[in-house]
Image (cartoon, rainbow, N blue to C red):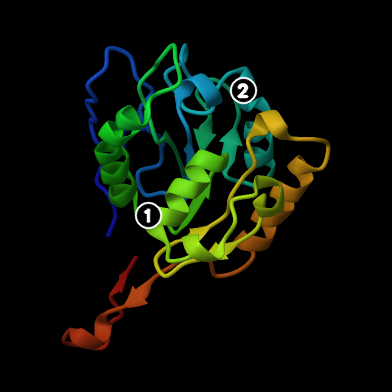
């Protein structure tokens, strides 16, 4: 099943309770969902697009080399990829935990609407949130971003590929991420179940 929308920015019309926000951006039928923290950390306050501007130049370059972006910039051309934040509101200060909690409903609705096969959380907060809420691996994994960067974590529902915060990258992180994406996309990474056995006929019925 595919989403019937060709809107790249805010394809599901999210309306969070804030004056300025950076909505999800990309392919609504994405296989890959890149998840960041909030605009003040990963960019987009002036462009309205996640992972744009100085904070994420290096990340965009690695995603492009890995084939998840077709072009970089303030409005990157995506290739089966969706970009979004845990907390999409533009804020001068770091959001409080209650503010993150209030935005959870918007993020969760968007994540489940996209239903990507692979989640790529960027930074410790996003990685911890994804592991705790969308896998059964949280109690088995220590959130050490240097160790987890570019390492596949297979959960029951999503495949997770954590990414260290771009502000912490050294000269090795780019190549490690590109190599990890190349390795991942060279395999059958899709997280699908064939429910065709429960329907009439012999045709497969694949769901994420």
The earlier-in-sequence mark between 1 and 2 is 2
Secondary structure of the residue carrying numbered label 2: helix
Q: Nearer the viewer, mark 1 or mark 2?
A: 1
Against 131, residue 187 (above or below) is below
Secondary structure of the residue carrying numbered label 1: helix
| Disc 1 from disc 2: Cα separation | 26 Å
Residue 139 in sight from this viewpoint: yes
Kindly identify which residue carries mark 2.
55
Disc 2 crowd, CA 10 A, few/some/many (<14, 14-19, 20+): some
Q: Is residue 48 left or right of residue 102?
A: right
Against 30, residue 91 (above or below) is above
Image mark for residue 133: 1
Quarter of image, res 54: top right
**What percent of the width, then of the height, locates residue 171?**
83, 36
Q: Is residue 146 left or right of residue 19?
A: right
Front residue of this view, candidates 105 and 68: 105
Disc 1 crowd, CA 10 A, few/some/many (<14, 14-19, 20+): few
């Amino acid at each position: 099943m595919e989403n019937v929308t060709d809107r790249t920015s805010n394809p599901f019309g999210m309306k969070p309770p804030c004056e300025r926000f950076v909505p999800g951006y990309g392919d609504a039928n994405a296989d890959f969902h890149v998840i960041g923290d909030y605009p003040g950390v990963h960019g987009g306050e002036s462009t309205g697009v996640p992972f744009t501007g100085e904070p994420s130049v290096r990340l965009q370059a690695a995603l492009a080399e890995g084939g998840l972006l077709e072009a970089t910039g303030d409005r990157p051309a995506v290739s089966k990829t969706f970009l979004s934040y845990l907390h999409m509101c533009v804020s001068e200060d770091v959001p409080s935990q209650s503010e993150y909690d209030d935005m959870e409903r918007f993020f969760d609705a968007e994540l489940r609407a996209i239903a990507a096969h692979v989640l790529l959380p960027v930074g410790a907060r996003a990685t911890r949130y994804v592991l705790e809420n969308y896998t059964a691996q949280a109690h088995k994994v220590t959130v050490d971003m240097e160790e987890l960067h570019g390492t596949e974590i297979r959960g029951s529902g999503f495949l997770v590929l954590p990414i260290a915060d771009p502000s912490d990258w050294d000269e090795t992180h780019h190549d490690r991420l590109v190599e990890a994406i190349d390795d991942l996309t060279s395999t059958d990474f899709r997280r699908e179940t064939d429910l065709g056995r429960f329907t009439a006929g012999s045709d497969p019925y694949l769901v994420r």
